[in-house]
Image (spheres, rainbow, N blue to C red):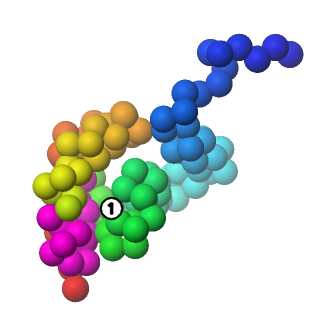
Amino acid sequence: MRNSADDIPSMPGSLGNALFRLIRQKGLMNRSATDTLDAEWKLIVGPELAQRSHARKIKDGIVEVAVTNSAVLEELRGYLHQEILQQLKTRLPDSEIRGVRYVRVR
């Protein structure tokens, strides 16, 4: 069997796509959409921010993200917001994400 360039996922997002396919194949998709959302969140923001934040749910196209402190809140809301929003839309197109709301938790 030949491999073509069309058969290989592009590098950006390929890990996220692989994780999404694995979750779907193992039947975990229906078990918890929240787990899938949070797994994608952690891939997008990276290990440091993932330790201090997690995606809770999507309601009416808005992703709710819990953050542990003000510094993380400002970094996500200020510096990374647009990039994160675009990544979420790309990785989870069926979710019809249109925004992100950050909530500080203790």
| Image-based side of 49 in relation to 79, left or right | right
As drawn, the residue found furthest toward the bottom would be 106
Q: Is residue 95 visible?
A: no
Name the spot of residue 95 as percent of width and height, x first: 33, 40
Position of the N terminus by quadrant? top right
Report the side of 10 relative to 83 (left or right): right
Which residues are drawn in magenta? Answer: 59-74
Name above or below for residue 75 compared with residue 19.
below
- Nearer-the-camera pick, 20 or 33: 20
For the point 18% across and 72% down, the residue is: 71
**Dot 1, crowdedness within 10 Å: few (<14), some or many (≥20)?**
many
Report x, y in % for residue 55.
33, 61
Asked if the magenta segment contains residue 23, the reply would be: no
- The residue tagged 1 is 55
Nearer the observer, 21 or 13: 13
- The residue depicted at 21 percent of the width and 78 percent of the height is 69
The disc labelled 1 sits on which kind of residue? Answer: Ala
Position in image of residue 14 (x %, y %) = 55, 37
Q: Is residue 72 magenta?
A: yes
The answer to whether 92 is drawn above or below residue 32 in the figure is above
> Residue at left 20%, top 61%?
75
Residue located at (52% from left, 59% from top): 31
The residue tagged with tag 1: helix, strand or loop?
A: strand
Q: Position of residue 6 (x, y in %)?
A: 62, 15
Q: From the viewer's perspective, is 6 left or right of 17? A: right
Rendered view: 95 above or below 47: above
